[in-house]
Image (cartoon, rainbow, N blue to C red):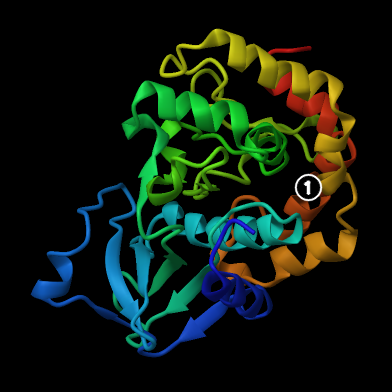
Amino acid sequence: NTFSDDINAVAQQWRANAVITGQAFRPLNGRELAQVPTIQGECRPGWMMDAAGRLVIAKTFPDATDQRNQISREAIVARLGHAVDFAVPPSLIWEQAAPHTPTRYASVSYRAFPNSRDLGALEGELAKNILARDKDFAFSHAFNTWVMRSDCRSYNYVADVAAASIPQPPVAYIDWGRSLQYYGKIGKGAGPLFRGHMSASILNDLMFADRYRVAAVKQALQSDATLYERIQQVPDSTINESVDAVPQHLMTRPGPQALKDTLRYRRDNIRQLTLRGAGLE
């Protein structure tokens, strides 16, 4: 399995309990901060620590903006990823103690690996090794398509650098706040909210200079029907449970029922939609 036993146990626990309240996490002190990398982003991510001394990343948004929907999206996608055994770090919604502060809710997730680095920061041969050998890389395009990921860049893929010398260095898939958004009608008429370079596929990303291996991934998407089975076999009940796990008032666009209907439609048509998103149909 991609993650440590510790993280896998958390994923199982958080799948059933998507919301946590109270003083569950604390900020790092100065000495602890000096030992972790600086992180930035529009969601104002910051390092915190749980009661067991494990590092987590907390992302916060002002309650007054529609961006708080990203908190629920992170939690839903983590549960869908867990359901299909895909390497999305566990995520939950943290309702902080002060109910009237501008950052009452936060999205909290564990770091995928202690030595994680995003693909955009890795040198050519290592990136090519991951692209060619990671067994989940091709599947990631189907999963991205299913959940309508609209912000998919090389830095959304992180590798375990400590294990990078082995033939299949573990890779995890992070930052799902800009998913589960679409334009048009529910179901057949639904499409990703953004297009172009912000799309469900990074197969045309210029960082991957070895086009032959990119072509091999595209070939797998076209010829390997088993890539889609993990999604096709997800029952309606799992989709419903993943959406219903988050508070409805944090889901304003789309609403819960519309999202369930669209995820079911995209599950049932995942191969066609994936090939279309990768420019193969």
Direction from residue 92 to residue 139 in the image, left or right = right
Relative height, residue 279 to residue 71 (above, below): above
Residue closer to the observer: 81 or 227? 227
> Where does the image place residue 2, in percent across and percent down from the top left?
59, 56
Direction from residue 214 to residue 41 in the image, left or right = left
Q: Is residue 278 visible?
A: no
Kind of element beneath mark 1: helix
Q: Residues within 10 Å of mark 1 (few under 14, many from 20)?
A: many
Residue closer to the observer: 1 or 94? 1
> Where does the image place residue 89, in percent across and percent down from the top left?
53, 60
Q: Residue at x 76, y 51 (%)?
A: 258
> Where does the image place residue 29, in percent across and percent down from the top left?
14, 77
Q: Is residue 154 visible?
A: yes
Residue 48: image quadrant is bottom left
Relative height, residue 244 to residue 234 (above, below): below
Residue 211: image quadrant is top right
Amino acid type, label 1: Leu
> Where does the image place residue 172, in percent across and percent down from the top left?
53, 49
**Quarter in which the C terminus is drawn:** top right
Residue 137: image quadrant is top right
**Quarter in which the N terminus is drawn:** bottom right
Q: Residue at x 61, y 59 (%)?
A: 78
Report which residue position mark 1 lands on: 263
